[in-house]
Image (spheres, rainbow, N blue to C red):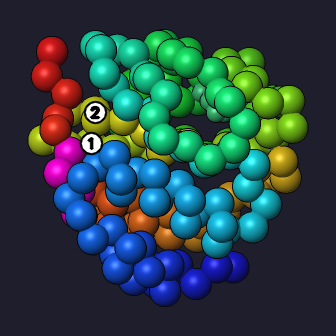
Amino acid sequence: MPDYALLSRQLDALLDTPDWLTNSAQTCALLIEELPDLNWVGFYLQRRPGMLHLGPFQGKPACHPIPFDKGVCGAAARSRQTQRVNDVHAIADHIACDAASRAELVIPVVVDDQLWGVLDLDSPQVDRFTAEDQAGIEALVDVFVARSRLAAFVD
Ligand code: SME
């Protein structure tokens, strides 16, 4: 189990600019380096109404764009609730960017009551994400939000 309190402090120190682009790239890089058994970490941003556009990420080239009514990322964007999936092969509405991905965690990023985007993590290991991982990674997203100037999407 990673030391999420330590990771939060490391991320807080790493994000020393309000620039969301720099900070989102740095956040992905820290997560893929420090968390075991991940094959993809990245942000999708709401750049148009109801559509998620691929942002900074680490891993293989990925699906783009993703409408709110599709996939695990779309479910997170629609519901504004974290989606924790133990095995994506069991989910009909999963968008397979990489057949190696088995578990997925998608955390919505909400700014000024608007869905700014989501952070998506994929793992080749079934049951990779526990409730403790979810809470720890949600806290890391809180650090990203607190450190960054995030312009809320305006319709
Ligand atoms: N699996 C996601 C699509 C994004 S990729 O995993 C990078 C989904 O079902 O929304």
| Quadrant of image for the N terminus | bottom right
Instruction: Tell me whether the residue at label 2 lies in contact with that at label 1, contact meaning CB atoms closer than 8 angstroms.
Output: yes
Q: Residue at x 28, y 49 (%)?
A: 20
- The kind of residue tagged 2 is Leu
Q: Is residue 147 magenta?
A: yes
Quarter of the view holding residue 90: top right
**Number of labelled discs?**
2
Q: Where is residue 126 shown, x and y percent of the image?
A: 84, 50
Tag of residue 98: none
Q: Which residues are magenta?
A: 146-150
Q: Which residue is mark 2?
A: 115
Q: Is mark 2 within 8 Å of ligand 1?
A: no
User: Which of disc 1 and disc 2 is earlier in sequence?
Assistant: 1
Q: Where is residue 58 shown, x and y percent of the image?
A: 62, 47
Q: Which residue is mark 1?
A: 110
- The kind of residue tagged 1 is Val
Magenta segment, principal secondary structure?
Answer: loop
Position of residue 62 relative to residue 14, above or below, is above
Position of residue 142 relative to residue 22, above or below, is below
Quarter of the view holding residue 47: top left
Tell me if 91 is positioned left or right of 63 in this view. Answer: right
Tell me if 40 is positioned left or right of 145 in this view. Answer: right
Q: Where is residue 86 shown, x and y percent of the image?
A: 75, 46
